[in-house]
Each structure stands twice: as C-alpha cells, then as structure tokens.
Amino acid sequence: MQSRLDKSPVATWWWTIDRWFLAAFLSLMGLGIILSFAASPAVAERIGLDSFHFATRQIIFTIPALIVMLAVSFLEARQIRRMSLVMLCIMLVLMVAVLYIGVEVKGARRWVSLAGLSIQPSEFLKPAFVIICAWLFAEHKRQPDIPGNLFAMLLLALVISLLVAQPDLGQTMLVLGTWGVMFFMAGLPWLWIVALGAAGIGGVFAAYTVFPHVAARIDKFLTGEGDTFQVDMGREALINGGWFGVGPGEGTVKRVIPDSHADFVFSVAGEEFGLIMCFFIMSIFAFIVLRGLSIALKEHDDFTRYAVGGLVTIFGLQSAINMCVNLQLMPAKGMTLPFISYGGSSQIAIAVSMGMVLALTRRHPEKRKQIGYAFSQRTIAAE
C-alpha cells in the first residue's frame, strides 16, 4: 500500500487516479475473459481449431491492453495531446493505405497487415480524433481568432471520407455522433444543431440509396425478410437464458451463432448467465458514461471537459449499438462490445482510449500535494 507522503510517480498515480473508473474497466476486462471461455469454443471447433483457441488469444490480447491502459494513464494532458497528434497522423496514412493494400473482408477494406499483425486503423484513429478535436474546440473558445472549430470540421470531413471509402458506416456513425456531442459541449448555436441534424438524416438516406448492403440491412430489420439468421439466433439465445441463464457451458443456441465470440457475445452472456448478467454488464457501461459526463460537467478546463466527454460518449455509443443489435432494436452492424468482444486491435485501441480517460480525470498534482501536506500536518499535530 502506498503512503500518502510518498511522492514517487506510482504513489502519485495511485492517490490521484479515479479508482471507480479503474475498477469498472478491470471488471469489463475480466468479464471479457470469462465470456470468451463461454462463447468461443463452439466457433473454434466449427472451423477446426482448438476449443480454447480464441479464449487463449483473448487473454493474450488483454494483458498488453491492460499494460497500455495503465501506461497511458500516467501521462499528463500535454503528453496526451502530443501522443494523439502523432497517432492521428500515422492512422490517417494507414487509412489511405488500407484502400489500396488492405485486406478485403465481405466487400470492405478495413484491415492492414504490418509485420504479421492485422491492424484496423480506424479503431486507433477514434481516440486520437476525439483528443485533437477537443483541443481545437478548446483553443477556439480560449482565443476566438483561432479557427479551431473550422479545423475540427475539416478534420471531421477528412475522417468521414476515409471511413465511407472503406466502407465502414458503423464507425462513421460513431465518429459523427461523438463529434456532434463535443461540438454541442463547446457551445454551438441552435442553428448549427438543426443543420447538423438535417445533414445526418440526409447522410442516412444517401447511405441507404448508394450502398446496397446498407439498404439490405435496413430492409431486413424493418420487414424481417431475408437472411436474419444471426440476429434471430442472438435474440433466441437471450430468450432461452431467461432471468438466470442455463448455466456456464450449457448454452445450446450459442453453438449456431457464427460470431458468438465477437459481435454476439452479449447474447451468449444472456443465454448462459441470464438477463441478470446482461443488466449487470449494461450497468457497468452506463456507470462509465454517466460518471465521465458528470466529471466533464464539473471540469473547469475546456480541453479536459471536451476530451473526457467525447471519449466516454464514443465508448458508450459503441457499446449501445452492439447491445441494441443483439436485442434486435436496430439493424445488424459489426460493432464489438468494448473490452468484452474478441479482437486484439479493438482491445488495444479501447485500452488507449480508457487510459486517456484515466489520465485526464486524475486529480491535479497540486491538489495531491495539498492532500499530502494536510495529512502530514495532522500527523505532526497528533504526535
């Protein structure tokens, strides 16, 4: 246990970190490993792999994700901005490269192979994009002559263009929604809100018109016709589990869900551990988002307020989309459940994002010194 009088970096980190956030993130990582053992064996056996192939890899992915999250949480706000600028530039280059040398999966190019590792640049682009936009919004508010809002709009247009070119409309929705929330936090006029809302509706209509696979998914969702096997089985798994589940390893519907270890792990949790587990998972995500927004609301520094608000918003939107798809509340979309779904690139990218949240929500060092000074004075007085 670290003493409050200890001024080492680790002790300072321990006494300034938001432990509620830390506990929530660690809980999700632990649930990811547990549910991987429940959801992945059937998928592994179906494609001729060892039963625990994906579960073992989930553990392997979680270890560096945890290290990355903790390492990023030690950084100061200025270091977060610098790291994000470098990461944004690298990921923009990789996003362009993906269009030419990326691996094509189901008609989309979203992955690039580097040194034998498959990376999805858009996952790492998201936290960097949020941080840089937060910085631009904050700079414009601090000095209105700086065209920060204009630069944020241009950056949004660039990122959206690259995402649509892949195409990846799910990530496009995430980025647009998060950027809109941050712009709202930065105090945009109501006229802009109406204009952006109209543009969003127009974008959905354009996507429905231009992209056949988007139209097919929306039509299947609205009519229930066509190939809806996976989402139907996801809902069936939740129904089969009832309130308390059929028990660990006893699920039967999960065995026929193609992506039970990835996009539909929430359904597996419902089948084997019941709706009680689903509500527990939902409550953790809700806690993270609400706590993050609450901290952002009380924060006096504009950059920190926008950055924390944006990071927890994109985290919450992604989890909400995944769970809504599992519950058949919206059209199917390949979106992972943060920290829980299988996937190395996603795990590391989310760890970077939440490491930033931990770093930006740490109590300020000067407050830490005041706490230590007050504690030492009380100790001396007691003696």
Image (cartoon, grey):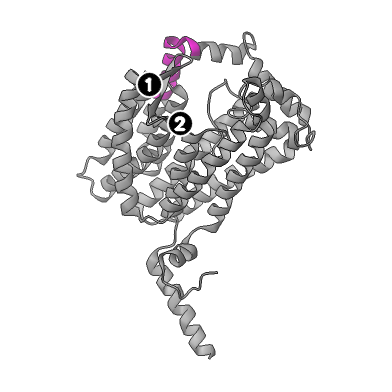
Q: Of the residues under marks 1 and 2, which one precedes in the sequence?
A: 1
**How far separated are the C-alphas under marks 1 and 2?**
22 Å
Mark 2 lies on residue: 174
Give the image location of residue 172, x and y in percent: 42, 26
Q: Quadrant of residue 119?
A: top left
Residue 177 vs residue 192, the one in the foreground: 177
Asked whether 225 falls inside the magenta stretch, the response is no
**Main secondary-structure element of the magenta-colored stretch:** helix
Decide: is 207 above or below 75.
above
Residue 268 visible, this angle:
yes
Q: Nearer the viewer, mark 1 or mark 2?
A: 1
Decide: is 100 above or below 158.
above
**Cβ–Cβ below 8 Å for labels 1 and 2?**
no
Instruction: Give the magenta-colored segment's residue range.
Output: 199-213
Give the image location of residue 361, x and y in percent: 45, 55
Residue 150 vs residue 307, the one in the foreground: 307
Decide: is 165 above or below 127.
above
Q: Secondary structure at mark 1?
A: loop
Q: How crowded is the residue under tag 2: few (<14 C-alpha within 10 Å), some, or many (20+)?
A: some
Side of 295 relative to 257 (left or right): left
Residue 215 vs residue 81, the one in the foreground: 81
Q: Which mark is residue 265?
A: none
Mark 1 lies on residue: 102
Residue at the extreme bottom: 383
Side of 173 relative to 228 (left or right): left
Name the residue type under label 2. Answer: Leu
Asked whether 211 falls inside the magenta stretch, the response is yes
Number of numbered tags placed on the structure image = 2
Q: Secondary structure at mark 2?
A: helix
